[in-house]
Amino acid sequence: MISQFFVLSQRGDNIVFRDYRGEVPKGSAEIFFRKVKFWKEGDEAEEAPPVFNVDGVNYIHAKVAGLMFVATTRLNVSPSLFLELLQRIARVIKDYLGVLNEDSLRKNFVLVYELLDEVIDFGYPQNTSTEVLKSYIFNEPIVVDSSRMPPLNPAAMFMQGAKRMPGTAVTKSVVANEPGGRKREEIFVDIIEKISVTFSSSGYILTSEVDGTIQMKSYLSGNPDIRLALNEDLSIGRNGGSSMYGSRSSTGGGTVILDDCNFHESVHLDTFDLDRTLTLVPPDGEFSVMNYRMTQEFKPPFRINALIEEAGQLKAEVIIKIRADFLPSVTANTITIQMPVPKYTTRVSFELEAGAVGQATDFKETNKRLEWCLNKIVGGSEHTLRAKLTFPQESHGNLTKEAGPVSMNFTIPMYNASRLQVRYLQIAKKSKTYNPYRWVRYVTQANSYVARL
Amino acid sequence: MSGHDSKYFSTTKKGEIPELKEELNSQYKDKKKDAVKKVIAAMTVGKDVSSLFTDVVNCMQTENLELKKLVYLYLINYAKSQPDLAILAVNTFVKDSQDPNPLIRALAVRTMGCIRVDKITEYLCDPLQRCLKDDDPYVRKTAAICVAKLYDINAELVEDRGFLDTLKDLISDNNPMVVANAVAALAEIQETSTRPIFEITSHTLTKLLTALNECTEWGQVFILDALSRYKAADAREAENIVERVTPRLQHANCAVVLSAVKMILQQMELITSTDVVRNLCKKMAPPLVTLLSAEPEIQYVALRNINLIVQKRPTILAHEIKVFFCKYNDPIYVKMEKLEIMIKLASDRNIDQVLLEFKEYATEVDVDFVRKAVRAIGRCAIKLERAAERCISVLLELIKIKVNYVVQEAIIVIKDIFRRYPNTYESIIATLCESLDTLDEPEAKASMIWIIGEYAERIDNADELLESFLESFPEEPAMVQLQLLTATVKLFLKKPTEGPQQMIQVVLNNATVETDNPDLRDRAYIYWRLLSTDPEAAKDVVLAEKPVIGDDSNSIESSLLDELLANIPTLSSVYHKPPEAFVSRAKSTSARPDDEEYTDAVETSYSEWPSSSVDSAAVTSTSSPVAHSVAHSVAKQPGQVAAAPTPTSPPAPVPDLLGDLIGLDNTLIPVDQPAAPSGPPLPILLPTSTGQGLQISAQLVRRDGQIFYSLLFENSSQMVLDGFMIQFNKNTLGLAAAGQLQVAPLQPGASARTLLPMVAFQNISAGPPNTLLQVAVKNNQQPVWYFNDKLSLHIFFSEDGRMERANFLETWKSLPDSNEVTKDLPGAIIHNMDATVEHLAEANVFFVAKRRNANKEILYMSAKGPRGVPLLIELTGSVGVPGLNCAVKTPSPEVAPLFFEAMDTLLK
């Protein structure tokens, strides 16, 4: 089981260190950091795998919010348990502190140690539910000023552009009281989808996938029952009928078919098969109500057309065209498009479309990559970038083989690719006047969004 | 409300400690609490605040839980360095363990268990007994874990007080959290004990399966992992278990899913109905794929496990290959694992899709990934005969891009493809030759040279191509040199014209006289003799048809694979190594022959030994060392060695080879005087039948602090034998003769005994330690006799190896844990404790201390090994029962294998 737990900053500073079993020498954090920093296999500097062994000590680590969460052990343990636990510890700490970063950890070290003692005993994970932990934790969090912090968590992306969202909510501690004294009754339900699409050189979709999660964060007092209704025609299991929940007859084009899904332990599925509703008593803190995966075809939000061709001697031209295939009422933001160009490229000159606003281009000399950033793209619009490449020598091969693929990063609030919907969110009423704030939000992000040349 | 915690880190100029001391003794609670926080802050940044021990402990008696927790945190940290002061806290602990507040009761037991001080431990028992039966589940679950803590400190105490039984009772507790912790504690205790403590009966099985549905995700993992040790009685029970476990596949926690998968895979072995198995495979696929949507760290762990699962049950994910396609933003460690699995899932049905992906990866930026992708294409070609041609055309396309490392990698895999499909794709050689001058990596060069040599007759300018490599022969790495040697010989045999003839002379000269590499030299000598004796035979050997290589993508051999699958989802299944290979104190489950490296090394050292000097009879036999090592490397490295020994007699004269080829300067020692020491019978190393009437028995012995080789010669031949000489080959401990072998001329029917003084560390062999001692003996009448003896480390144990108890403990502590090596000695036995101790003392293994633990005797002993290296020994076992566990801690853990062998001999 876990011998030591520690959190290191990116520079390798020890922010939190707890030894549970005294089996591993004290210098382990130092050994770990050196190993990770100078991880090399072959001549390329590589990223260390999350699990490795040095001198009989196993180091298991996960990167969360720019920090390294590490556990050590001498025994033949289950590394997935460790990794899940590390993520969960990060989440609990974030629930308590509101923000998870070096500063907040340092300011709240006593509270963090108190949490760690309840979460792990003698190396065995005990409880990681923010809700349950509340009865055993006595230190109060010191909330750090979150307005100066860069957004770190998926929920933070709602703050961009959408002024409807209460900006402070997502970085609010679950336990700390509001300055005003009483807490605001509210609940957030976020449907976050990460989509991966690979387009072939001729524009066909080779693979497409949605990794979705329904994230909930409840600030409701008294933990009332909640009912969450999803699409009625939702079906699970691609082969229809083989699903563990049985599947409903698909009614043509509109059906959402998930490949697989799983649920938080607080979720009751009694009525799920019947009417696709989930009932639960949400524990305090942030948690995933449901994770799902879909490979059913969906309409990709962006079409990418890219080409590279010779343009005279020692020159080539790149044209990248992006078309937003969604409604004009929706706006994607923080879009980055990247494309590696032949390694021998020495110079690049860009040409943006006439009247382009909020766009920037760059040629990353070190890794020979074009970068095109757009602040936002409105649904239905189309944007084009032209770039001229200069080579010092005759290109000797096939240009398309030495350049590309084009990859794209974006966030689209109030859009979801899978069409999975929360039809309604019902909170059991405590009194007639009880009417807490309910926020149901959708967002789609690019995971691996790639077009080949 | 507490203020800003970080202010506790700020220091004042004058005397921080006295100031804190004053604040700790303040009568104001808030000030006290702030002071303790400051102390903890100082502690966490590594400052020594142990001098405040009494003052902090004084704050312990408080109703304020926040303050109490802080004091406890401090206590855990410093109790070990201040055991006498820690006693002061005992009373409060005991009192707290009876507090009306369950949180305080639990806190007291939890903290006491963390303080590893003997004096405290004694006082822990009573509170623990009470808390195990507490009304509050929070207290009980804390107490359950505390039993494991106590067992780690003092196992005897736990058994004596009957805590194990109480713990077992907790399995039936009505609170699932308590059940889960009891299971975790029992599983850990079982891990360190050899006696059955935690046995899962069908009764406990039912209880645990029920608890499974209600406990936390972590508890589910404990229970699933504990249950995976349960062997179902029949297919029906297995099906029942699987049915109860299957819903866990739907859990959001990946650890739960993987533990459930393991459990199902295990029970599936028993299930006979193919329908059920097929259905289970179908159910497992989506959750396994879903693991790949988790954080990249978890994906990595999942992929390593999936790699094993698809080797055993390829059908589970046969249709899911697309999910293993690499995403451009996957970390490199995830991409590499996905590639492996793609190769394993590649089939005639999906190969086009897969090749398209590989081709794409081969033009990416990351060099290692690109290399692996190119290699993957080759592996698919070898695996799927019908797709081979398509794979090759992709490789050729890639070669045309002329990216240096892509070309080199492609050539390496094409060499393997040639070996898989001989005489099929040689038309592409011309294309390969175009890239000749860009090759700069040894493996690529060696592969290209092999191709040229192998197909010399089809390449018009093969001699020119090879010649261009020859110029740099002396500077090339061994791998390239070996290939150049073989390729030149092939060229010469295929085209025995003037050019190749000159080349071969240059190469043989370079590879025999001008090299220090024994492999190269040996191979060159064999070729040389072959060519000079019988070129036709050389042709038969060198140009013989080579066995076709197979697909190695399912690379883990099946017994290891089964062991690894049984270890899902642990580190073992992620590293793809059995637990003994990396867990320092794991109970080694089976006596596997040490790791492969070890056996490899022994083989290599064989080939360094007599090589061509062995008489002709030995060369012909396939089991001779040379033939063996050649065959071995043929199997391992396709295309590297093309020669096999043939029945030709070596042209070189015999007499001087012994001294010559063993490579030692000291000449043979003539025999002078008879000596007749007596002693117990010696093992026969050279039987009469082999020795043409001469029988030699010998053994290494230690007498009066000196090492001797005790020898007995018996002459049953018809002639007088005289002029005995002896020589030892290089060996791990560098043993060599220190004087002359003194044996009088031996009449027919006579025998002679002698003691040959030995010295150590004279001619040490390289490589990992092994026990082989190779001896050569000659006389004036007979050929040279070779025989093997065994080195035993115990003859090195010196008489001054006794250690005082305190010294032993100190030395033990001063050595890092990594210096400890453990091994089971299944054949060893202690019949009688006193007799064994006495017997070991005669062998200079000295008794230090003894204790009993769980019916086992634990003996601590010391010895002093070669070069005065101390060996601290722990022997665990029961009197009269065969099988001992032996642990040794020493500054030179590399001697451990030899040591274990010595102990095994001593304790037989």
Image: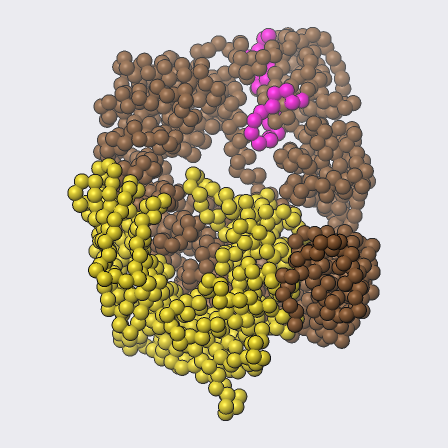
| Image coordinates for residue B877, horizontal then vertical, percent | 72, 46
The picture's colour for chain B is brown
> Where is B387 relative to A326, above or below?
above
Assess whether residue B763 is covered by the magenta stretch: yes
The percent coordinates of residue A374 (x first, y second) are: 31, 61
Instruction: Choose top left, top right, bottom left or bottom right for residue B157.
Output: bottom right
- Can you say which quadrant of the picture contains the N terminus of chain B? bottom right
x 36%, y 78%: residue: A231
Q: Residue at x 25, y 40 (%)?
A: A391
Residue B435 image position (x, y, % from top left): 27, 31
Residue B418 in which image quadrant: top left
Q: Nearer the viewer, residue A70 or B575?
A: A70
Q: Is residue A233 visible?
A: yes
Q: Is residue B129 left or right of residue B541?
A: right
Magenta-highlighted residues: B760-786
- In the displayed orientation, state which residue is furthest to the bottom: A432
Left or right: where does residue A371 sit relative to residue B153?
Answer: left
- The percent coordinates of residue B222 (x first, y second) are 59, 63
Magenta stretch secondary structure, dominant: loop
**Display colour scheme:** by chain
Q: Nearer the viewer, residue A377 or B466?
A: A377
Residue name at image x 31 percent, y 57 percent: A360
Horizontal arrangement in the rendering, residue A300 relative to residue B97 (left or right): left
Pick the front one: A135 or A122: A135
- Of the 4 image quadrants, the one containing the C terminus of chain B is top right
In the rendered image of this protein, which colour is used for chain A? yellow
Q: Is residue B710 magenta?
A: no
Point 40% across, 76% down: residue: A164
